[in-house]
């Protein structure tokens, strides 16, 4: 059968994926960047008091749901935080696919960074508009595309991530805002999945840290990483909020997030807003760790965040490195095609505010042993 042939090819290329067994070593895998998920039992009593008789299922989409009070309350809180209109979505994937596919209509050009997340790529592909890509963080190439094409379209959307999920480097948001202003009818779309909770005075993301929240037209924020919850939200203008309610198919045709989950998300966001000291400590820890990795590999680390890649260059080598670390009691999974390009296979290490320098010093010694 053709599907078995595909599996055989994946196996030969060291790309066959399986759902890993439960991990029990030192965690460098999860996106629990602020350590909230690891501490979730601390908040059980507080959550029980808050949830009271809140149901565990919405039982319908938001457009058909009877009781909107819990969802509305969280959206209103997010509206106040961002100074925008927010719309809860079922996941970051739902948010990107729904938003970008609905925006990509005839007369629209979406210009995206080549390293955007798969959910953004899928949303663009599902749409009926035109698209173009620029080399990663290459502002000169982006500007050339816009000079040559922007005037031909009613709307142009620049789509990027603020923190890139595989390299941990940052988008040049200030320059992107300036470029956007040079071209009429251009919107800036930023996925803050890996920045929310980690960057900014209140943890609202890189746009907040750089003072650019009013300048970003569409923000996508996930709640299943640093916020230790589930779901996502879109933060945008009043008109685009209404547009997504009416045109984003992943919103219209999905059962809404469970009200009990919404209440948990609200509690975790409250905790996240207060974690200023933890954010500072995580940034200091990440900077130190990146320096230690550079000392081992002899290569400059492009990351400027809590996501730190160690490049292997081949799938089999990445697998071997992960296995070696597992033998040292450290959980770090290999990243291979199609998640990253061929020849850039790697380990992706995720640091957390729950880590300490003492813990990570032991990790560094184990990485040295692997090399």
Image: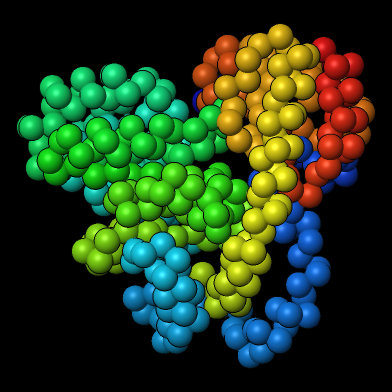
| Protein image colouring | rainbow
> What is the quadrant of the C terminus in the image?
top right
| Residue 224 visible within the image | no
Residue at the spot x=74%, y=29% of the render?
289
Residue at image location 66% in from the left, 49% down from the top: 279
Looking at this view, is 193 or 287 the one in front? 287
x, y percent for residue 288:
74, 29
* Furthest residue in direction left, as rendered: 152
Task: Kindly indicate the quadrant of the structure image that contains residue 94.
Answer: bottom left
Image quadrant of residue 4? Answer: top right
Q: Is residue 248 above or below residue 360?
A: below
State which quarter of the image contains the N terminus: top right
Q: Relative to 361, is 18 on the left or the right?
A: left
112 over 263 or under it: above or below: above
Query: Is residue 43 rendered to the left or right of residue 95?
Result: right
- Camera-side residue: 55 or 184? 184
The residue depicted at 73 percent of the width and 12 percent of the height is: 297
For the image shown, how many numbered marks are present on the structure?
0
Q: Name the one closer to the observer, 129 or 76.
A: 76
Horizontal and vertical percent position of residue 249: 32, 58
Residue 59: image x %, image y %?
49, 78
Quadrant in the rendering for residue 178: top left
Which residue lies at the image location 33% right of the left edge and 49% below the top edge? Answer: 216
What percent of the width, then of the height, locates residue 166?
A: 57, 30
Left or right, 70 with reference to 106:
right
Q: Is residue 329 above or below residue 62?
A: above
Question: In the current view of this chain or complex, which residue is farthest to the top?
Answer: 298
Asked if residue 281 can be seen in this view, the reply is yes
The image shows residue 162, relative to residue 113, as above or below, that is: below
């Amino acid at each position: 059968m053709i599907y078995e042939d595909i599996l055989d090819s994946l196996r030969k290329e060291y790309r066959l994926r399986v759902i890993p067994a439960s991990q029990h070593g030192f965690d460098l895998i999860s996106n629990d960047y602020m350590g909230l998920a690891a501490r979730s039992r601390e908040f059980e009593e507080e959550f029980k008091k808050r949830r009271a008789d809140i149901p565990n299922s919405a039982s319908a989409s938001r457009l058909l749901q009877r009781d909107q009070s819990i969802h509305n309350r969280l959206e209103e809180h997010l509206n106040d935080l961002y100074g925008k209109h927010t719309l809860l979505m079922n996941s970051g994937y739902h948010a990107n696919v729904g938003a970008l596919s609905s925006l990509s209509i005839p007369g629209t050009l979406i210009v995206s960074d080549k390293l955007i997340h798969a959910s953004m790529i899928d949303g663009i592909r599902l749409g009926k508009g035109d698209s173009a890509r620029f080399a990663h963080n290459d502002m000169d190439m982006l500007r050339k595309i816009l000079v040559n094409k922007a005037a031909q379209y009613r709307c142009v959307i620049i789509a990027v991530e603020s923190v890139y999920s595989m390299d941990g480097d940052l988008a040049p948001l200030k320059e992107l805002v300036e470029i956007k202003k040079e071209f009429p009818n251009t919107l800036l779309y930023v996925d803050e999945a890996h920045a929310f909770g980690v960057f900014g005075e209140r943890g609202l993301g890189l746009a907040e840290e750089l003072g650019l929240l009013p300048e970003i037209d569409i923000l996508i924020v996930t709640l299943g990483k640093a916020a230790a919850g589930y779901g996502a939200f879109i933060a945008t203008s009043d008109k685009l909020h209404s547009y997504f309610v009416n045109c984003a198919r992943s919103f219209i045709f999905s059962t809404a997030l469970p009200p009990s989950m919404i209440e948990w998300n609200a509690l975790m966001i409250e905790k996240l807003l207060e974690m200023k000291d933890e954010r500072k400590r995580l940034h200091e820890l990440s900077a130190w760790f990146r320096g230690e990795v550079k000392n081992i590999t002899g290569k400059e680390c492009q990351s400027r965040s809590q996501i730190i890649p160690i490049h292997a260059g081949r799938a089999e080598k990445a697998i071997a490195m992960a296995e070696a670390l597992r033998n040292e009691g450290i959980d770090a999974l290999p990243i291979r095609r199609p998640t990253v390009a061929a020849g850039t296979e790697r380990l992706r290490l995720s640091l957390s505010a729950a880590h300490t320098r003492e813990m990570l010093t032991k990790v560094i010694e184990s990485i040295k042993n692997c090399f």
